[in-house]
Amino acid sequence: MAESEERAAEEEAAKKRRPRALQLVRTEGSDKSCVTFVLHDEDHTLGNSLRYMIMKDPEVEFCGYSITHPSESKINFRIQTKDGVPAVEMFQKGLEELMGVCQHVLTTFELFFWEVWRILA
């Protein structure tokens, strides 16, 4: 087997061993309004930003996260909603709103950067 084929096979095997980036955990007997999401390879940067965006919604009763252990890059992210609203919808809405904020910050930064670059050049 060629070296490049071996490397490709090793990378494929590593992908299969790696846990999914997102897992849903629901306790037995709970409804769709109370869900814990497990986010792999994430830390406080995403956890706190996403928690803030989700908590702004009045349909959210509780939203919090915890880092399982300092040596692990895994977040347990819990959402509880009011009136049976699916927690998955609030999670998705929070991610979309956070992406919008990040895009706004990036666009504003780039505009400012090129304006300064033009003045200094």
Image: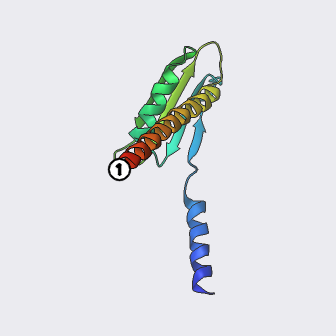
Amino acid beneath label 1: Ser
Q: Quadrant of the N terminus?
A: bottom right
Q: Which residue is mark 1?
A: 71
x and y, in percent, of residue 59 in the image = 58, 15
x and y, in percent, of residue 46 in the image = 45, 38
**Occupied quadrant, residue 31:** top right
Tell me how the rendering is colored.
rainbow
Whether residue 11 sits left or right of residue 110 in the image: it is: right
Residue positioned 50% across, 32% down in the render: 101
Q: Residues within 10 Å of mark 1 (few under 14, many from 20)?
A: few
At mark 1, the secondary structure is loop
Residue 76 sits above or below residue 62 on the image: below
Nearer to us in this view, 34 or 102: 102
Residue positioned 62% across, 24% down in the render: 30
Residue 26 sits above or below residue 74 on the image: above
Residue positioned 51% across, 35% down in the render: 104
Nearer to us in this view, 85 or 109: 109
Residue 9 sits above or below residue 100 on the image: below
Nearer to us in this view, 39 or 48: 48
Residue positioned 57% across, 69% down in the render: 11
x and y, in percent, of residue 33 in the image = 62, 22
